[in-house]
Image: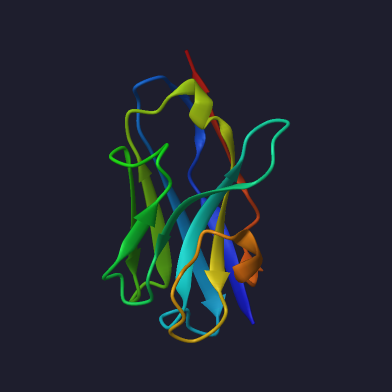
Protein backbone atom coordinates (compact mmCIF):
# COMPACT_ATOMS: atom_id res chain seq x y z
CA UNK A 1 0.00 0.00 0.00
CA UNK A 2 1.06 3.56 -0.69
CA UNK A 3 -0.39 6.60 1.02
CA UNK A 4 -0.11 9.92 -0.79
CA UNK A 5 -0.35 13.20 1.10
CA UNK A 6 -0.55 16.44 -0.82
CA UNK A 7 0.46 19.93 0.21
CA UNK A 8 0.58 23.32 -1.44
CA UNK A 9 -2.16 24.93 -3.48
CA UNK A 10 -4.33 27.87 -2.53
CA UNK A 11 -5.42 31.14 -4.07
CA UNK A 12 -3.23 33.03 -6.55
CA UNK A 13 -3.72 35.79 -9.10
CA UNK A 14 -3.50 35.10 -12.80
CA UNK A 15 0.12 35.00 -13.90
CA UNK A 16 1.30 33.79 -10.53
CA UNK A 17 2.95 30.54 -9.48
CA UNK A 18 2.28 27.71 -7.08
CA UNK A 19 4.01 24.46 -6.27
CA UNK A 20 2.21 21.31 -5.26
CA UNK A 21 3.92 18.50 -3.39
CA UNK A 22 2.89 14.91 -2.97
CA UNK A 23 4.66 12.79 -0.37
CA UNK A 24 4.40 9.02 -0.29
CA UNK A 25 4.51 6.83 2.79
CA UNK A 26 4.30 3.10 3.17
CA UNK A 27 5.98 1.12 0.47
CA UNK A 28 8.60 3.14 -1.40
CA UNK A 29 7.23 4.76 -4.50
CA UNK A 30 10.61 4.88 -6.25
CA UNK A 31 9.53 2.25 -8.78
CA UNK A 32 6.15 3.81 -9.57
CA UNK A 33 5.20 6.20 -12.33
CA UNK A 34 3.46 9.26 -10.92
CA UNK A 35 0.87 11.60 -12.32
CA UNK A 36 -1.05 14.75 -11.57
CA UNK A 37 -4.69 15.16 -12.49
CA UNK A 38 -7.19 17.93 -11.89
CA UNK A 39 -10.94 18.32 -11.71
CA UNK A 40 -12.29 21.77 -12.62
CA UNK A 41 -15.63 22.82 -11.15
CA UNK A 42 -18.48 20.95 -12.82
CA UNK A 43 -16.14 18.96 -15.07
CA UNK A 44 -14.56 15.55 -15.15
CA UNK A 45 -11.10 14.76 -13.88
CA UNK A 46 -8.42 15.39 -16.50
CA UNK A 47 -4.78 14.55 -16.98
CA UNK A 48 -2.21 17.24 -16.22
CA UNK A 49 1.26 15.70 -16.13
CA UNK A 50 3.11 12.46 -15.51
CA UNK A 51 6.66 11.29 -14.87
CA UNK A 52 8.42 7.95 -15.21
CA UNK A 53 9.72 6.09 -12.17
CA UNK A 54 13.26 7.39 -12.57
CA UNK A 55 12.13 10.82 -13.65
CA UNK A 56 13.80 10.57 -17.04
CA UNK A 57 10.67 11.28 -19.07
CA UNK A 58 7.78 13.62 -18.49
CA UNK A 59 4.42 14.06 -20.18
CA UNK A 60 2.06 17.03 -20.20
CA UNK A 61 -1.41 17.97 -21.29
CA UNK A 62 -1.33 20.50 -24.11
CA UNK A 63 -3.12 23.01 -21.92
CA UNK A 64 -0.24 23.17 -19.42
CA UNK A 65 2.78 22.47 -21.60
CA UNK A 66 5.44 25.12 -21.16
CA UNK A 67 3.86 26.42 -17.93
CA UNK A 68 3.84 23.41 -15.59
CA UNK A 69 6.76 21.18 -14.61
CA UNK A 70 6.52 17.79 -12.94
CA UNK A 71 9.52 16.47 -11.05
CA UNK A 72 10.30 13.92 -8.39
CA UNK A 73 12.83 13.24 -5.65
CA UNK A 74 12.85 9.52 -4.95
CA UNK A 75 15.14 9.97 -1.95
CA UNK A 76 12.38 12.05 -0.37
CA UNK A 77 9.50 9.96 -1.76
CA UNK A 78 8.02 13.15 -3.17
CA UNK A 79 6.70 14.34 -6.50
CA UNK A 80 6.17 18.00 -7.34
CA UNK A 81 4.12 20.07 -9.72
CA UNK A 82 5.50 23.54 -10.34
CA UNK A 83 2.81 25.72 -11.89
CA UNK A 84 3.78 29.02 -13.50
CA UNK A 85 1.86 31.59 -15.52
CA UNK A 86 -1.36 30.36 -13.96
CA UNK A 87 -4.65 31.13 -15.66
CA UNK A 88 -8.19 31.23 -14.28
CA UNK A 89 -8.94 28.08 -16.28
CA UNK A 90 -6.35 26.25 -14.18
CA UNK A 91 -8.74 26.51 -11.23
CA UNK A 92 -9.45 22.97 -10.06
CA UNK A 93 -8.90 20.39 -7.39
CA UNK A 94 -5.54 18.81 -8.12
CA UNK A 95 -4.73 15.19 -7.35
CA UNK A 96 -1.48 13.27 -7.39
CA UNK A 97 -1.59 9.60 -8.26
CA UNK A 98 0.72 6.61 -8.33
CA UNK A 99 0.61 3.82 -10.83
CA UNK A 100 1.03 0.82 -8.57
CA UNK A 101 2.93 -1.45 -10.91
CA UNK A 102 6.71 -1.53 -10.72
CA UNK A 103 8.45 0.24 -13.61
CA UNK A 104 5.28 0.71 -15.64
CA UNK A 105 5.15 3.68 -17.97
CA UNK A 106 2.85 6.49 -16.94
CA UNK A 107 -0.32 7.19 -18.84
CA UNK A 108 -2.93 9.87 -19.26
CA UNK A 109 -5.88 7.68 -18.25
CA UNK A 110 -6.77 8.05 -14.58
CA UNK A 111 -7.93 4.41 -14.54
CA UNK A 112 -4.27 3.34 -14.79
CA UNK A 113 -3.46 4.79 -11.38
CA UNK A 114 -4.00 2.85 -8.17
CA UNK A 115 -3.26 5.29 -5.39
CA UNK A 116 -4.50 8.84 -5.03
CA UNK A 117 -3.79 11.85 -2.87
CA UNK A 118 -6.52 13.65 -0.99
CA UNK A 119 -6.79 16.53 -3.46
CA UNK A 120 -5.73 20.16 -3.18
CA UNK A 121 -7.72 23.20 -4.26
CA UNK A 122 -6.01 25.63 -6.63
CA UNK A 123 -7.91 28.82 -7.37
CA UNK A 124 -6.64 31.37 -9.88
CA UNK A 125 -8.32 34.75 -9.83
CA UNK A 126 -8.45 37.02 -12.87
Residue 122 location, quadrant: top right
90 or 108, which lies in front? 108
99 or 62, which lies in front? 62
Residue 83 position, x and y percent, is 37, 39
Residue 8 left/right relative to 116? left
Answer above or below: position of 45 versus 99: above
Color encoding of the figure = rainbow
Q: What residue is shown at x 55% (from left), y 30% (from top)?
A: 91
Q: Residue furthest right?
A: 42
Total count of labels: 0
* Observer able to see residue 71: no
Answer above or below: position of 106 versus 32: above
Q: What residue is shown at x 54% (from left), y 84% (from top)?
A: 101
Residue 91 left/right relative to 71? right
Q: What residue is shown at x 32% (from left), y 34% (from top)?
A: 84
Residue 94 position, x and y percent, is 57, 45
Residue 17 left/right relative to 95? left
Residue 121 position, x and y percent, is 59, 38
* Observer able to see residue 88: yes
Residue 117 location, quadrant: bottom right
Quadrant holding the N terminus: bottom right
93 or 65, which lies in front? 65
Q: What residue is shown at x 43% (from left), y 46% (from top)?
A: 61
Amino acid sequence: QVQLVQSGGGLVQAGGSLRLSCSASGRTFGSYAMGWFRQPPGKEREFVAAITWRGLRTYYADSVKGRFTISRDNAKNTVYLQMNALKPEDTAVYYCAARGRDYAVPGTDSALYDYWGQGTQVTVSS
